[in-house]
Amino acid sequence: MAASAAWSLTACSPDAVSFKSTDITGAEFGKGLRLTDHLGQARTLADFQGKIVVVFFGFTQCPDVCPTSMTTMAEVKRLLGERGQLLQVLFITVDPERDTLPLLKDYMAAFDPGFLALRPEPAEIKAVADSFKVYYKKVDGQTPTSYTMDHSAGKYIFDTAGRARLFSNYGTEAAVIAADIETLIKSR
């Protein structure tokens, strides 16, 4: 009788939401984030309530990971069709010394005019990276300006209420990310 009662209760409950990306619901990433975007406007995550926000850390002189990730996010937006209006991609530079606001503006325009780049001041980058538990490290080059940046390459996906919900690894296909975002949109 108890087994029958338990089955009848679960039969009436909605299906659990499942994702292909790593579910990080309950994590507290990016709290207190306040950075200037490439248009010179101060931004917080709260500015994007009602949208799915994808946060990616990178730098404009990255030869492969960053442009690949940003191209993937442009494809995600295209795959979402009209629902792409609900997507806000935020690119946070880990190289504020070289990534000026005009350079970040041009970089975003190469992928999608609606994407925003955020630039911490050099003294702020550690706190911002720590708030997302992101790794970054300057790697010296042959000249003082030819250095590169090692950095974490995943994407943090926030739901329309501003809660961290998913972590998508570098290399995840656009269709998989788009499907996870569709699931978040439907479950709001």
Image: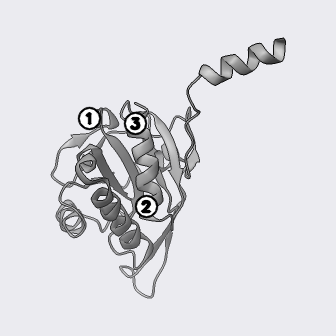
Q: Are marks 2 and 3 in contact (CB under 8 Å)?
A: no
Q: Dividing the picture into quarters, in which one does residue 158 lie?
A: top left
| Amino acid on which disc 2 is placed | Ala
Depth check, front residue: 106 or 144: 106
Task: Say few, some or many: other residues with alpha carbon within 10 Å of mark 1 (under 14 / 14 to 19 / 20 or more).
Answer: few
Image colouring: one colour
Q: Residue furthest bottom?
A: 142
Q: Earlier in the sequence, mark 3 or mark 1?
A: 1
Compute the Cα span from label 3 to label 1: 21 Å
The spot of residue 7 in percent (x, y) is 73, 21
| Amino acid on which disc 1 is placed | Asp
The residue indicated by pointer 1 is 47
Depth check, front residue: 40 or 106: 106
Quarter placement of the N terminus = top right
| Amino acid on which disc 3 is placed | Lys
Q: What residue sits 60% from the left and 20% below the top?
A: 12
The residue indicated by pointer 2 is 175
Which-is-in-front pick, marks 3 and 1? 3
Label 1 SS: helix
Which-is-in-front pick, marks 2 and 1? 2
Looking at the image, is 75 positioned above or below residue 33?
A: below
Task: Say few, some or many: other residues with alpha carbon within 10 Å of mark 2 (under 14 / 14 to 19 / 20 or more).
Answer: some
Depth check, front residue: 156 or 183: 183
Looking at the image, is 167 positioned above or below residue 32?
A: below
Quarter placement of the C terminus = top left
The spot of residue 4 in percent (x, y) is 78, 17
The residue indicated by pointer 3 is 186
Compute the Cα span from label 2 to label 1: 27 Å
